[in-house]
Amino acid sequence: MDADSQIESMFQSFCSLFYLGSPNHDLMVEKCLKAASAFQMEVCGYNLSEGLWERERRRSRDRAVDPVEMLEKILAANREEGVFKRRLFLLEHFDLLLESRDAMILTKLRLIQDRSVNQYTVVLLGSPFYPL
């Protein structure tokens, strides 16, 4: 199965949390954005060094957001009333945070998995062959 089909299958499954490892990070971001368009998903992303970005304003980034705050924003998005459009959150280089085994990060990711109710999909982008 090629990368495009694999990403589309992930989105179709309505599973809320995925790890996607690739040696070509930029290509995977573009493939996720393409698939999100096909599913008419709103897109928001986070990069450890550059901060929060939204698809419509990709060049404008909020660097003041830390990783835990970003995960809180995802959890808060699930509690918004009257919002029924699916969302995609791309969390870039999160394998670096998983390696540290930070209890707060791991707990928030578990909460995201447990509370998504099919409203959003979170893709953790990182290096290939990362053992979860």
Image: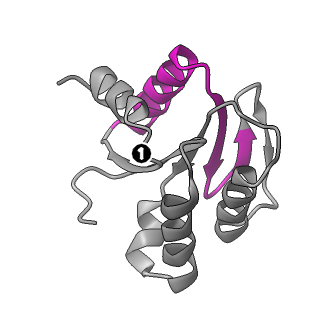
Counting from the top left corner in percent of width and height, residue 58 is at 72, 31
The region drawn magenta spans 24-53
Counting from the top left corner in percent of width and height, residue 105 is at 55, 74
Occupied quadrant, residue 71: bottom right
Question: In the drawing, does residue 98 fall left or right of residue 78?
Answer: left
Question: In the drawing, does residue 87 fall left or right of residue 123?
Answer: right
Q: Give yes or no for residue 52 being in the magenta stretch.
A: yes
Question: In the drawing, does residue 91 fall left or right of residue 22?
Answer: right
Q: Give yes or no for residue 35 being in the magenta stretch.
A: yes
Counting from the top left corner in percent of width and height, residue 24 is at 35, 36
Label 1 belongs to which residue? 15
Specify the farthest residue to the top. 38
Residue 3 versus residue 122: which sits nearer the camera?
122
Secondary element at image label 1 = loop
Specify the farthest residue to the left. 1
In the image, residue 5 above or below residue 58: above
Q: Residue at x 44, y 39 (%)?
A: 14
Q: Residue at x 82, y 61 (%)?
A: 64
Counting from the top left corner in percent of width and height, residue 1 is at 17, 24
Can you say which quadrant of the picture contains the C terminus? bottom left
Query: Callout 1, which amino acid?
Result: Cys
In the image, residue 87 above or below residue 4: below
